[in-house]
Amino acid sequence: MRWMIYGAYGYTGELITHHAKKMGYQPILAGRNEGKTQELAERTQLEYRVFDLNADEIKENLKDVDLVVHCAGPFEITAEPMMKACIEASTHYLDITGEISVFELAHSLRNEAEAANIVLCPGVGFDVIPTDCLAARLKSQMPDATQLKLGFDSRSRMSRGTSKTSVRRLGEGGAVRKDGKIINVPLAYKTEEINFGDGKKLAMTIPWGDVSTAYYTTGVPNIEVYIPASPKLVKSLKRLNYVLWFLKLGFVQNWLSKKVDKQPAGPDSKEREKLATWVWGEISNERGETITLREKVLNGYTLTARGATELAIYVLRNQLKPGFYTPSRLYGAKLIDRFLAEK
């Protein structure tokens, strides 16, 4: 079976490419930039294709492709044309997004995916494999849960792509799920002391992908996602709530994006090996009963490289019911066990 990594020359796409090659697989590499795509293909001795994300070009290049791992952001712009082309071509779609809007888009296309006999499963990396699996395990232990909190503690630097996504999302504020609906909330909407696994830390809510996916995994109607944050950062973000309109302006977005371009592409191999990540979840019901789980997993970028590759091969090798999936619904909550770090 033939599969493709689109956006293969990006920081995370290249990590997936190298891991896939190391595992003995032969994905087709693809992207919009011919020079970068060709250079990576020559280094890895893999087939490559170059095409833009317009419907006709995508469909033409997916005719003989069984599955795409989409890695070219910003996903809020690139995911829709790729998803719809995959549906037209009956090609399975996976991606590494953490963007709420992309998960919601995939869910809205579930009937089309079923009719095309394909799997749509966004978020097959650190966004959102470990937290999604934790959510599934928590729900299995408390079937009557009404509140779910998830979070992670990572000291690893973000890649340029992740940073640009954060910049693009900044002007939208935060997001949580309340009574089954995703609602916009201020930045740093809630704070609390959380022990993610390495001692108690001040933490704040963020608009992470699980606000969307954990609902489809668990059915729990109230969901929040947290990361550690210093009091100074919380205070700064709360002040930004007064000027969110300004952060949406084109010239401000361009300025912030150019600042991101000056950063390193992402953490190097030593940093990825050294800096693992704690993931945390807490579930509760109307009686006030609470269950907490914590796991230490691989560095987020290492996890993404392995997770995207493993789920691509899993989809290709198994006859799965078509439609929309979250990672834990696709593979099972045991998926997290493949990416545990030493404690």
Image: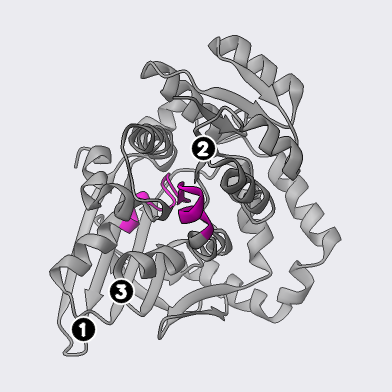
Q: Position of residue 175 (x, y in %)?
A: 52, 74
Instruction: Give the magenta range.
Output: 112-132
Sequence-wise, the earlier of marks 3 and 2 is 2
Q: Which residue is mark 3?
A: 148
Disc marking residue 285: 1
Q: Are marks 1 and 3 in contact (CB under 8 Å)?
A: no
Using the image as rendered, state which of residue 62 and residue 34 is in the foreground: 62
Q: CA distance from mark 1 to mark 3?
A: 9 Å
Q: Amino acid at mark 1?
A: Asn
Q: Amino acid at mark 3?
A: Leu
The residue shown at (68%, 59%) is: 168
Q: Position of residue 36 (x, y in %)?
A: 70, 22
As helix, strand or loop, the secondary structure at mark 3 comes to strand
Using the image as rendered, state which of residue 319 and residue 147 is in the foreground: 319
Sequence-wise, the earlier of marks 2 and 1 is 2
Q: Which residue is mark 2?
A: 69
As helix, strand or loop, the secondary structure at mark 1 comes to loop
